[in-house]
Image (cartoon, rainbow, N blue to C red):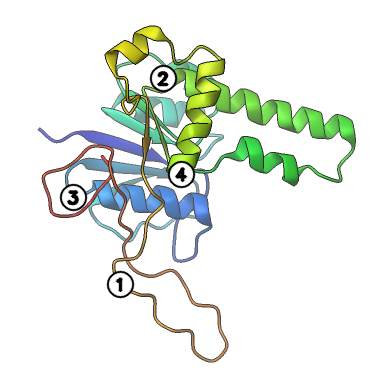
């Protein structure tokens, strides 16, 4: 029986996407060869891969995300609405927090220039959201070893990595694992006519579930 996976995208997916949507879509594609995959993405989204079911839901669609999460074996999300996270945490679905973007550091530069009180409010919300995901997740994935060190350190300081966890797995790979953002299998075509080249190729993403295929996929 194939594992069912819900991948949650915070932004629309389609022909042109920003980094978070690319990450979610390519994870879904990599998993689709060995798992039954649903991609939750807000409108307007188009999913070109017919192996992937599309759930039109974004961060405001709490009930739809909770219902879908409870129907799948694994939920992979860069972010979840706080209410949805609370209701899914500890449930039957394994929760994978995809923290490939260390927004707790990024936000420091992102709020620069704003009024000091607003800077502290925004930073505090981002930190609290990240800690909630770390605490609820059965597994944390990130893009490289430096990020892995960041998340392990943060988890250790908040007692999410303790003696019992170390005794079970001294490598801590069962808690925090690296799944690179990915590289195209084929080189992107050269831009012509001074235009901006689009995204092309399928991304290789390593390590989460180890399907029995020749493709280096993440779950």
Q: Residue at x 26, y 27 (%)?
A: 73
Frontmost of labels 1 and 4 is 1
- Name the quadrant containing residue 35: top left
Check disc 3 and report its element: helix, strand or loop. Answer: loop
Q: State if disc 3 and disc 4 touch (CB < 8 Å).
A: no
Residue 80 in sight here: no
Q: Which residue is mark 4?
A: 9
Q: Which residue is mark 3?
A: 33
Tell which circle, 2 or 1, labels the residue nearer the N-terminal end. 2
Tell which circle, 2 or 4, labels the residue nearer the N-terminal end. 4
The residues bearing labels 4 and 3 have C-alpha atoms spaced at a distance of 19 Å
Check disc 4 and report its element: helix, strand or loop. Answer: loop
Q: Which residue is mark 1?
A: 186
The residues bearing labels 2 and 1 have C-alpha atoms spaced at a distance of 38 Å
Judged left or right of residue 86, residue 95 is left
Furthest residue in direction top, as rendered: 164
Q: State if disc 1 and disc 2 touch (CB < 8 Å).
A: no
Q: State if disc 2 and disc 3 touch (CB < 8 Å).
A: no
67, above or below 113, in the image: above
The residues bearing labels 2 and 4 have C-alpha atoms spaced at a distance of 16 Å
Label 1 Cα crowd, 10 Å radius (few <14 / some 14-19 / many 20+): few
Q: Residue at x 44, y 84 (%)?
A: 190
Determine which of the numbered discs, if any, sits on residue 88 in the image: 2
Please state the horizontal and vertical placement of residue 111, each as a whole percent of the image. 78, 42
Tell which circle, 4 or 3, labels the residue nearer the N-terminal end. 4
Q: Residue at x 36, y 56 (%)?
A: 47
Q: Residue at x 57, y 28 (%)?
A: 130
Judged left or right of residue 141, residue 115 is right
């Amino acid at each position: 029986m194939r594992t069912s996976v819900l991948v949650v995208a915070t932004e629309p997916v389609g022909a042109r996407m920003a980094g978070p949507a690319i990450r979610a879509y390519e994870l879904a594609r990599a998993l689709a060869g060995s798992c039954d995959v649903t991609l939750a993405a807000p409108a307007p989204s188009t999913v070109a891969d017919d192996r992937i079911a599309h759930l039109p839901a974004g961060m405001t669609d709490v009930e739809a995300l909770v219902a879908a999460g409870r129907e799948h074996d694994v939920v992979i999300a860069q972010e979840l609405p706080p209410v949805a996270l609370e209701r899914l945490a500890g449930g039957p679905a394994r929760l994978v927090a995809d923290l490939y973007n260390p927004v707790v550091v990024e936000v420091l530069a992102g709020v620069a220039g704003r009024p000091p009180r607003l800077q502290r409010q925004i930073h505090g919300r981002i930190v609290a959201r990240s800690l909630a995901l770390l605490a609820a997740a059965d597994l944390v994935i990130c893009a490289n070893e430096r990020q892995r060190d960041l998340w392990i350190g943060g988890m250790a300081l908040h007692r999410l990595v303790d003696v019992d966890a170390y005794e079970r797995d001294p490598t801590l790979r069962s808690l925090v694992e690296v799944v690179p953002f990915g590289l195209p299998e084929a080189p992107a075509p050269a831009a012509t006519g001074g235009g901006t080249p689009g995204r092309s190729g399928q991304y290789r993403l390593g390590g989460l579930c180890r399907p029995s295929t020749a493709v280096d996929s993440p779950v």
